[in-house]
Amino acid sequence: MKIGIVCYPTYGGSGVMATELGKALANKGHQVHFFSYAIPVRLDMVSRNIFFHEVSVLAYPLFEYPPYELALISRLVDVIKYEKLDVLHVHYAIPHAFAAYSAKKMLREQGIRIPVVTTLHGTDITLVGKDPAYEPVVTFSMNKSDAVTAVSQFLKEETHRFFKLNKEIKMIPNFVDFERFSKQPKEHFKMAIAPFGEKIIMHTSNFRPVKRIDHVIEVFRRIREKMPSKLLLIGDGPERSNAEQLCRTLDICDDVRFLGKIDAVEELLSVADLFLMPSENESFGLAALEAMACEVPVVSTNAEGIPEVNVDGITGFTCNVGDVEGMAEKSIMILSDDVLHKKMKQAAFKKAHEFSLDKIMGMYEDVYDEVIKNQKARLSKSA
């Protein structure tokens, strides 16, 4: 099967999942064509089944904002036509779903048919998509897609609640690759980070306000008051400078490491004792899932789709958004009780296996087969 995948190239969850899915499909023998304005951060081009098509945008003084969507449509039409793709899978509705519809419409005028699958990842629906400036086109694009999927039950229900859709959404969750994310103890890492046996707390994100990095630091401060601890912050973004200043104000800089963007995050997760996720919004909780695959208990908020991954009292604990004191208490409870910590590590690992790559990839392959089959049936009926 020849599959086109449209995604953002950044560290965000939609781009990461799209890239990992495409790589897995290519390893299975499918031919995968990626479309984006830059090479996705997790894309390994060393594969005979992977192709990357850069979307170049014309810089012209008349345009205050470069017309990326038009450039994407043109690139899609060109590649789909000449590579004879079987299905187009777009990740993140804005603007990819409408670009896919436009390309499909243009190709149909040339006698070329291609089904479109749209995967919703979160803020494309819960934040941006609800904006009155975007809602009509987002609704239209979803309704014109041959299939729509969402990465959590929460996101599926939220989409149906706010948008008038003429089709059902299939829930296909995010996944984790256990060949990459698994417990891989590296004692030299642990000794370098915590030479005196301190507890290692971790957080990874894109450091946006909704991730509440300040709450990560506040929770850590309370943990540190009860036991020797180190905090590893992986990622970067607009809140980093504020977070650094907060650490200075609290006088905890010696025990906090800002590591920036790291690709091999699994190597650090393997030495972590606890993962913190105080997010205000999180349609799924991919970072928590990756931690759980490395046998790390999670203390998180109960926002949106997170409880579908982190089960309160089983794989860790969940608290209300903003409950810094509660998150600190739960964290200290886990870290100070070896029996509980071991039990939650095992439960986290077991839960993570419900989201294995092979299982989820098969669900997407079934969707591809279904939309291709339905399109052939429609063409046969109209002949």
Image (cartoon, rainbow, N blue to C red):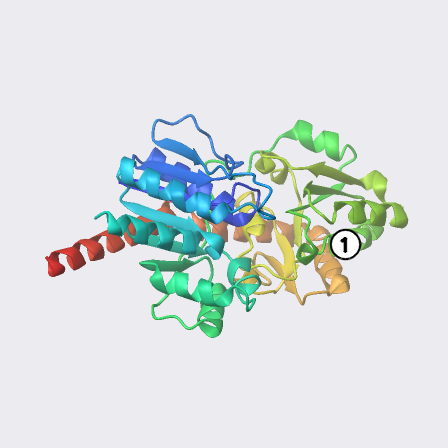
Q: Which residue is mark 1?
A: 214
Residue found at the very far front of the displayed protein: 62
What residue lies at 84% left-to-right and 41% top-to-bottom?
A: 253
Label 1: which secondary element: helix
Q: Position of residue 24 (x, y in %)?
A: 38, 38
Q: Position of residue 55 (x, y in %)?
A: 46, 38
Q: Which quadrant would the C terminus be assigned to in this image?
A: bottom left
**Crowdedness near tag 1: few (<14), some (14–19) or many (≥20) residues, C-alpha within 10 Å:** many
Quadrant for residue 198, please give it: top right
| Front in this rendered view, residue 370 or 257 | 370
In the drawing, does residue 294 fall left or right of residue 213? left
Q: Position of residue 260 (x, y in %)?
A: 69, 37
| Front in this rendered view, residue 236 or 73 | 73
Residue 166 position (above or below residue 273) = below
What residue lies at 67% left-to-right and 55% top-to-bottom?
A: 211
Residue 153 position (above or below residue 209) = below
